[in-house]
Amino acid sequence: MAGSSDSGGAADGDNKTLNFKVSLDFKKEFKGFAVSQGITMTELLKEGFALSKKKREK
């Protein structure tokens, strides 16, 4: 998970930090969902972003 590579990203050394604040409840739900799906929070964020872009480009 944390050390796993994903299909659309750069190597770990090329990754940059993305900082923003969310509520504690959102963080717990987001992290819990990622864990339940066996993916990292980064992978979940990237997947959600891709889906949002696709929906909004129609």
Image (tube, grey):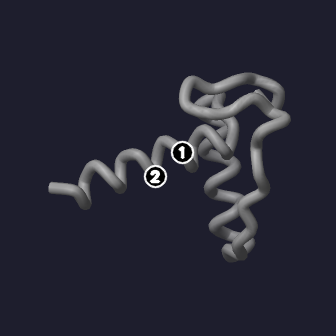
| Residue 49, disc | 2
Q: Identity of the amino acid at label 2?
A: Phe
Is 25 above or below relative to 8?
below
Decide which of 25, 7 is in the foreground and name it: 7
- Name the residue furthest left: 58
Residue 52 screen position, x and y as percent = 36, 55
Q: Quadrant of the C terminus?
A: bottom left
| Lateral position of residue 52 relative to residue 58, left or right | right
* Snapshot quadrant of residue 53: bottom left
Q: Quadrant of residue 42?
A: top right
Image check: 55 left or right of 1?
A: left
Indicate the quadrant where residue 57 lies.
Answer: bottom left
Spatial CA distance of label 1 from label 2 is: 5 Å
Q: Quadrant of the N terminus?
A: top right
> Which residue lies under the disc numbered 1?
46
Q: At 70% from the left edge and 72% from the top edge, which residue is drawn?
A: 20
Q: Residue furthest front?
A: 14
Picture layout, residue 54 above or below residue 7? below
- Secondary structure beneath label 2: helix
Which mark identifies residue 19?
none
User: Which type of secondary structure does the marked residue at label 1 adopt?
Assistant: helix
Q: Which residue is pictured at 70% across the width and 62% down the height?
A: 27
Relative image position of residue 22 (x, y in whole percent): 67, 74
Residue 44 x/y as whole percent: 57, 43
Q: How many marks?
A: 2
Residue 57 versus residue 12 in the image, above or below = below
Q: Residues within 10 Å of mark 1 (few under 14, many from 20)?
A: some
Q: Amino acid at mark 1?
A: Lys
In the image: residue 46, left or right of residue 42? left
Identify which residue is drawn at 70% across, 23% down. Answer: 5
Contact, CB < 8 Å: mark 1 with mark 2?
yes
53 or 30: nearer the viewer? 53
